[in-house]
Image (spheres, grey):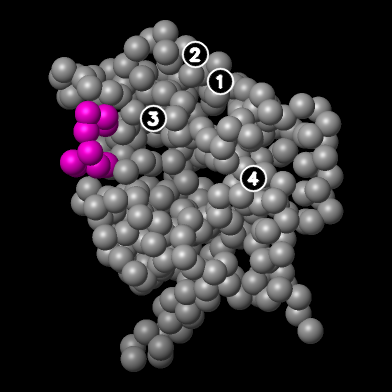
Amino acid sequence: MLTISNQIKTKMPAYMTGCIMQQYYGAEDGARHTAENGYTHWYIDGSNYDDIPSKWDDARTENMCNLMQELDVQAVYHGNFKNPLASDVPDIRKAALSYLKSEIDLCEKFTAPLIIHGGAIVEPRSVKEAMSVALDGFVEVMQAASAYATDKGVELWLENLSNYQAFHPFYYTFTNIDHYRYVLPQIPNAKMIFDVCHETVGGGDPLAVFEELSDSIAAFSFSDTDGKRDSHWPMGEGNVDFDGLTRLIIENEWKGVVAFETRGAKPNENIDYVSTLYEKHRNPQALAS
């Protein structure tokens, strides 16, 4: 009889090299929950105060490495999205880079990729000008971070944030195709974890972005939304066209890991959903029907 772990891995679509769990547990409990549910990876959430870099002394770090080996799961460190890496204030960016380096140091110990967010600018008098300065600052920070991470053997994944149209006075950075086109070519070895829910908020088109930038996408984050908020609904309950995205994934022969940030869906339901779509599109008879 297959174990739960083997059942999940057997059901994963061929394009998935791993499945990442994010259910907002602390690091150690998250690792155990991931193994119990048959996923291959999980998020250590750097915005959780108990899991920020300064909370990892040598003993705790060693215990986590041993636990990962025992459970046969791998960590992905979800960097603190509140770190203002794209601030339009140079001194704040300098401090943000220092904090980012501490996350990279921790990822080196875990042999984990690091997810990075641009952060937000707050109450700018001129939004267009402030955003331009912030994006240039983000590129500057990421160029330094990329060099530092390369020396440490750590892979960096830039995550797009939601392009909110109504919730201001803050403005997220790295939220739309114009930002991606500007930032990615300027950063050595730049890769994205493409959050399709975030992209849909504010009217973005995940399929168009994937078609243009598939070579730069190392991983996906899957959840659903009505386009108004970062809702984290179960897949199929909102406006994200997962059917069309699956077709494009197969056509582009993309492979990578997929994070499931769904609230209200069981871990096996996520895998069943993507597997059903994959089987539909890889089978021409099923597709024709």
Identify whether 57 is placed above or below 25: above
Dot 2: what SS? helix
Mark 4 lies on residue: 26
- Sequence-wise, the earlier of marks 4 and 3 is 4
| Mark identifier at residue 99 | 1
- Sequence-wise, the earlier of marks 4 and 1 is 4
Res. 90 image quadrant: top left
Give the extent of the magenta segment: 163-171
* Amino acid tagged 2: Ala
Label 3 – label 1 distance at C-alpha: 13 Å
Marks 4 & 3, CB-CB < 8 Å contact: no
Label 1 – label 2 distance at C-alpha: 6 Å
Q: Is residue 196 left or right of residue 37?
A: left
Label 4 – label 1 distance at C-alpha: 20 Å
Label 4 – label 3 distance at C-alpha: 23 Å
- Sequence-wise, the earlier of marks 3 and 2 is 2
Identify whether 190 is placed above or below 25: above
Check residue 122 for magenta coloring.
no
The residue carrying pointer 3 sits among few (fewer than 14), some (14 to 19) or many (20 or more) residues within 10 Å by Cα, namely: many
Name the one closer to the observer, 204 or 166: 166
| Mark identifier at residue 95 | 2
* Amino acid tagged 4: Gly
Of marks 4 and 3, the one in the foreground: 4
Could you tell me which residue is drawn at 41 percent across and 23 percent down?
A: 84
Marks 1 & 2, CB-CB < 8 Å contact: yes
* Amino acid tagged 1: Tyr
Could you tell me which residue is drawn at 34 percent across and 91 percent down?
A: 289
- Sequence-wise, the earlier of marks 3 and 1 is 1
Marks 4 & 1, CB-CB < 8 Å contact: no
Dot 4: what SS? loop
